[in-house]
Amino acid sequence: MGHVYSPLRKPLVDGDKSLHDITHDVCRSIEGKPTALWWYGFLASAAVLGVFLVVTGWTLYEGIGVWGLNKTVGWGFDITNFVFWVGIGHAGTLISAVLHLFRQKWRTSINRSAEAMTLFAVVCAGLFPLIHMGRLWIGFLWVAPYPNLRGPLWVNFRSPLLWDVFAISTYLTISAVFWYIGLIPDLATVRDRAKHWARKLFYGTLAQGWNGSVRNWNHYEKAYMIFAGLATPLVFSVHSIVSMDFATSVIPGWHTTIFPPYFVAGAIFSGFGMVLTLLLIARKTMRLENYITLDHLESMGKVIILTGSMVGLAYGTEFFIAWYSGSIYERFAFINRATGPFAWSYWIMVSCNVISPQTLWFRKLRRSPVFLFVMSIFVNIGMWFERFVIIVTSLHRDYLPSSWSYYYPTLIEVLELVGSFGLFFFLFFLFVRVMPAVAFGEVKGVLKMGRNYDPTGASAKKHVPAEDKPAEGSPEVSHA
Amino acid sequence: MNAKLAVLFFLLTVGMAMPILLGIRSIPDIQLPNLHTGYQPEQPIPYSHRLHAGVLDIDCQYCHAGADQGRHAMVPTLDTCWNCHKTVAGRTQTAKEAIGKLRQAYMSGEGVEWKRVHNNADFVYFNHQTHVRIAKYIDADGNISDGIDCTYCHGDMAKNGVAKQEEQLAMGFCINCHRDQNDRHVAANLPARAPVNACDACHR
Amino acid sequence: MPKEKNNFFLGVFTDEDDVKAAAKGCNEADFTIYDVFSPYEVHGLDRAMGLGQSKITWVTFLCGLMGTTIALSGMSYANWWDWPLNIGGKAPLPLPAFIPVTFELTVLIGGVSTMLGLFALCRIFPGKKARLFHPRVTDDRFVVVIEIDEDFDEAKCREIFAKNNAEEMKQVDHDYAADPADAEASAEGGAA
Amino acid sequence: MEIRTNNDDFSDMPAELRQEAEQVSKSRRDFMKVTGMAAMGAVIAGCTAEDRFVKPLVNKPEGITPGVVYQYASTCQGCSANCSTLMKVRDGRPIKLEGNNLSPINGKHRGLNIESPKAGGLCAVGQAQLWTLYNPDRLHGPRHKEDGEVEWAKLDAAAAAAIKGGKAVLLTGTISGSSANAVIAKLKAKGVRHVSYDAVSRYAIAKAHADTHGKSGIPRYQFGEATVVVTFDADFLGTWISPVEHARDWATQRDLKFGRDSMSRLVAFEARMSLTGANADERHRIKDSERGAVLVALANKLGANLGEPGKHSVPADVIDKLASELKAAGKRGLVVSGSRDVNEQKLCNWINHTLGAYGTTIDLAAVSHQKLGNDEDLARLLKDMEAGSVSTLIVWGCNPVYDLPDGEKFKELLGKVSNTIAITLRADETASECTWLAASDDALESWNDFEPVKGLHTLAQPGVRRLWDTRNGFSCLLKWIDDADKNKDYREVLKAHWEANVLNGQSWSSAVEMGFVDRSAGNSKTQPDFKASGMGDAKSAGAVADTGALEVTVYESYNLRDGRHAVNGWLQEMADPMVRVSWTNLALMSPTTMEAQGVAEGDIVEVSADVDGRKAVCKVPVMRQPGQAEGTVAISLGYGRTKAGPIVHGCGTEKDAVDPDLLDEGVYRIGGNAFPLVGSKPVGGSISKTGDNIRLAKISKHDSQEGRPILKQTSLEEWKKAPNAGNDEELPPKDFTIWPKWEYKGHKWGMTVDLNACIGCGACQVACSVENNVPIVGKEEVWRRREMHWIRIDAYYEDDSPFDGKLTNNENPEVGFQPMMCQHCENAPCETVCPVIATSHSDEGLNVQAYNRCIGTRYCANNCPYKVRRFNWFRYEHHNLTMNLVLNPDVVVRSRGVMEKCSMCAQRIYEGKRSAALANEDVKDGNIQTACAQTCPTDAIMFGDRNDAKSTVARLEKDPRNYAVLAEINTRPTVTYLTKVRNRPAKKSGLALEHDGHSHEEH
């Protein structure tokens, strides 16, 4: 036997599935007609995306003045949304790459959608630095270091914003590549199941003639490992670089060495929160309870406690260092966070990010999809506010009190935030209709884990439709 | 074998990257569109620089009198033309016609609306006096001359008929000269007269 | 003189452990294994059929190195060699500030090259028609394909296949390709 | 009327103009947007841009080269102080006004101990005068009230006939010029009565002197001679008589640079917090009604025996101490009062006389002619109009319907006058009630002369050809009385008069070149004798009138003055330097009074009072003013104009309009008119809430420096002990760096601001806006805190006691002013973070911003510890072609989406370097002046080359008072400050350095 699984391990896939069952279950959702639920979701997200396009168009037409920013607070919702979405984009690659490197087989059922989530979140994230520019129509070009007629005038490689440009575009590219490479074998399967010529052409082109040759698998396995190896430091580097937008500045509340690890932990935290939100929705609507089991959910719950406590520690550390620094500006910045005019946002952040995840110490709550769903929403809200707190409360009262100010976001900014969710879900709904949402090629590889496996599935009940099975409490299989 | 391959690949990379990067320096010399180089619009009066500046060898600043006095070199006012043309009627038919137009424009007080040939963007400040009268030009050998020759930017107008833009006059054209001249001024121990090598020289 | 193409003998399996053993057996029997096909990545199957380390690691390493070089030389050129501007009183060649972009470009160029390298090594490209040796080879069947050449011994091969619970054994022409449309029929047959 | 939307691009423009502007620019704007997007395509497609044309003149004007700036001397007519100016004229249009360095009024040649050969001070109002010139909302030709536009001839005929008809009166403001008065004399000879009045009257001073010294006139105050100045509500640094002159003179006694070690002392008694009070070393809050009592008490201590003064709130020891200080100062003491009460002025005269101040700090021999209005004449005129004995009234250069306390009454009386003629710039409140409107030239288009102080004759000459069909007022008058000179250009009349009467053999051209002729040397130095008999019943001023719970005090607004500058966008946006709320006037109250009255900031209240038997009401929003006397409400004059032209209308949304009920011909008015509240005696009033609320366009929302060492200050006592007092915090080593330092081999420009000299007047702010094409953004945008000023004046309110969480609620805080502009840091945080190198450091030590490179990430502004970068949130459209004439062609007009900031007037630096190079010499210190340094009346801002060891800024680097703001973050600014030193004893408790304060702030 190639693999020796510990008898203590529980099965990763419930419901006594055969290899073919897996293929069938996953492909069914992209082969048949979309469900009504899908249509509702898709159309709703498309409508919200429409709102986004309209308000963004208005912003570009009129100028950044339609936002509530001012001379003191130069960044508000725009960069908050950017960092928020980048953070969301982290868990996807992390789940895929890091868990792959650590041979965490439970990743297989969720990594595909997590990667897709990464990709779409980074797309959303990338939009905000673009539209926040005063002159987008030249800015998008001028941040690229290309030879030009301005002679020796290049870009400024000292600027953290430029690092962002490289980090985000690299992250987007590598995430897309990683995702696509993972998709190829599954696309080949879909291609071979396809009946309609257009589907054959579409999936055939994307699958690039993959035929499961072990000579190719030989390269593929290595390449996949390399991508995981490249993506892992990339994940850490990207959010570290994003944090340097703030850490390299001189503004009290921004100028902190703790930011890179703090941001990475926060990113993983928020990313897992969002993965959880999406998975819980997908699990229910796509009938994937057998693939996304309670064990998966529980593992993610544990990650949330861990990372939530990490950001909590970071919050505390910031306060300590502010006090320890002896700098009156630094101290004021943090006291102002907790007690100043933006204290409300600070306390939303603390209660959502630090206090509420502590409930997940209870196993019962960790295994309750409903509770986890609520918790994941809290985490998302809390992490958005974390970025808001860092950006806005630090800026609005910095060194010279004469410039102190407040920031009143306008409706347009709020709609842009809401609209970006429209874009995200629009892309996600498209994805689940077009691409296999579970990496079944990899799920098949771990099918034998933790159970006495009958390859033909003959001894198992044949084709038990998943929806007929109880969603929770699937039968324990003995490991004797 | 793999080690050899690695070294080869590395050398290839460096060997490819460096010439490309160094070659970029010559980019300003590469003609790109939309720079008006060679722009030679038809003018209401086909004034010939070849005749006036070339054959007759009239000094540029006889007409463009503002060049050493201020920001604008000035397209000459019509009385400057009329100074000579009240007695010079031209020999050829073309010349006679052109001078006839001039007489008409001058006598009626209508003036002539020329097409601007050398255009700077609105956000670029350029002062002729600084370049023509104040600046010193130091060539690669260290020879210092007073003022920058008109031809440096405008090309040899005396060989053109109707005015024509010879150089690109994009930022690279300006800044490369400023940068090099700055170095040469420092080398020639003339730092006080060195052209400013920073944005506010032109953008303010 | 064009080399004459050999016909194939293939065995179809339904379990990853079976096919691994079969491939190993064929390899030890010195058969020329044309290829083995599997619907998912079976760890160790490549070693079982006698394949070594993939060369793709070199592509990544060298292209990554190229990325590093391009990043460092390009940034140094732009910010230092070409026009050393005074920006924030920082040094004209601020190497620490180059670290992030250097890292990103290394990963970017290394990563994209790895993808292209993978396609090249696998000889796949958009529009290539997949050659399948079993209609369900991308679903749940494993196929071992042996070239029928001078080293081939059909009886021994059948013995190896049968020992490892082969579902099907057959000899096919050198240009054989299965049609995935037969998958349903085959599924019925398989289940029977 | 079209209501402005929140995000209107034309936010700084009024409704009427906007329509016009939109027609002109909308298409162009859209086109620009499309082309902006299509620019990429154009590059690829390689298409050429449109042809641009150039059309030279037919004949070259003699001596004028296009693009070269010429300076012409003239006289500022922004207020009646009449400072001398230099107009920078380029291509036939004035683009900047600057003080004339040689003028005895505002030149700084004899001022402080520093090199400033090119500087002549000018206040904010003077700097902003170009707006009035180019504002297209002027009369474009003569008009008739009903018939609209008419021919000049028709108007002339009507006016001439009216004057011939007799019983004609000419009503003007102060007219001081020699030639001007000659014209008036000609009118008088034809039977026209001349009445002049000042909206903000100083007549009481003249009247008091008439009684006590037998000479009616306002003396010339010499603050430069005074060592102790006591001011009773006279805001001589802000608006009183000749503020630029007074500020300059006063500052010479406050200078502690280069070895000087004595300072004058300023003690202020006032109800509201004035600019002068804020700069005082000692300030006491008294109600206006207590002023007389305090004066009597002070006079008693100085030896007068005026009996027991009325009740007042000033402790006896304060008055004792003050009296002994004044005694010690002797003839170098000076007491001034801004009161309209003659008796109070007489008390001042007595004190000054007792001190022996006449002849040193007060010059009554060479009197000031800056306020010649005669309130008694005016009262007589009103009576005559009532009686119907005026048949023709010519109103010129004043606006009585608006600025008389009983303007409504005057409006009625106008109806009783059969012929009313206004010589006016625009159809203002008065002119629009007149039958004939003679469109007058702007001050910058016409010849005029003045005599601001006796013997000093100044000339005003035009800087531009008439923009519209207007006429010099004097020419009108000469024409109407059918004078011999009626067809001459007024220049000829003026020249002839000057040659005969003023020039005294000096050539006309030299006078025009200088802009003034100083004949004051011939003035008698003998001061008129004091006549004790003239005191009369002066001590009655000491009886305090009971004004009830709330006393109303009105004051001349610093920026709009008496309202004539209400149309001026620069001044509207600059805001009052003390209150720092733009685009409205306010009912100012101390926080305690606000609490007592139950009102909050932004509430619109009705301040009503019984003034001299009239019911007066003023509707204004409430604002907190720490330092104001309890139980008083202060309102500034100058706002609430209803016919000042579009700039004051249409700014802000409907919600922001102060008073929707006053929707007047489709326009809202800004602020409320406080002139009705002007009374002859202190006025008691009451306030009632209207229930409306307004978002105040505050320039600064926080007025404490939270104990941070930003504006460093100390007392003279401490400074004498240790010259680095107040500037002794421990800083990291200055030269510590991990990078090799950049060397600045040629020039290294730098600036030093002497906080001791800065009075917070804001002249620099307007000068900067004019010089650098800084847009105004309007009320809504200022409320959003998006004002664009490159230089701002931070006002910090501080107090003796350690921070208690309610710092600015303290009753009598000290105020410090700190001009804050780009600090041009050597280690500039903004430069490092710009992704596209839109901002970098020049080799002359400046932080430069290339607007056209900027992509608008705003990261630089975020990372600026001084918050001096300004972002163009919208296209602050310059869409009126006439208004665009004011733009400085050497400075780019920034488009939307780019960051801008102080460039240290790069264009002026280059200009200075160019002229030095042309003369083949080195740049001399003081020859290059930034716009702010140039105009600063007190030379608080000093600019120069830090690499030039002889320069002022380089020498001041060694001054122990020299410090950089936020030095601890090692940005190494090239702008430094000198500690503010107050002439008062050291305070026992220092400022608390650590606290977590968050004082009152609007959310």
Image (tube, coloured by chain):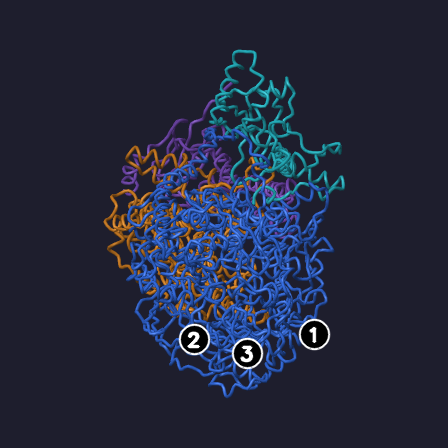
Chain colours: A orange, B cyan, C purple, D blue
Amino acid marked by disc 1: Lys
Using the image, determine if residue B166 lies above or below residue A102.
above
Image quadrant where residue A356 sits: bottom left
Nearer to us of marks 1 and 3 is 1
User: What's the CA distance linking mark 2 and mark 1?
Assistant: 36 Å
Instruction: Specify the label residue D560 is tagged with.
Output: none
Locate residue D1002: give its quadrant: bottom left
Q: Amino acid at mark 2?
A: Pro
Residue ID for mark 3:
D802
Nearer to us in this view, A104 or C65? C65
Count neighbours of disc 1 (C-alpha within 10 A) and say few if under 14, some if 14 to 19, many if 20 or more.
few
Q: Secondary structure at mark 3?
A: loop
Q: Chain of mark 2?
A: D
Question: Do callouts 3 and 2 point to residues on the same chain?
Answer: yes
Q: Residue at x 57, y 86 (%)?
A: D317
Numbered label attached to residue D591: 2
Q: Which residue is mark 1?
A: D720
Is residue D652 visible in this depiction of the protein?
no
The chain identifier of the residue carrying mark 1 reads D
* Circles 2 and 1 on the same chain: yes
Horizontal relation, residue D251 to residue D675: left or right: right
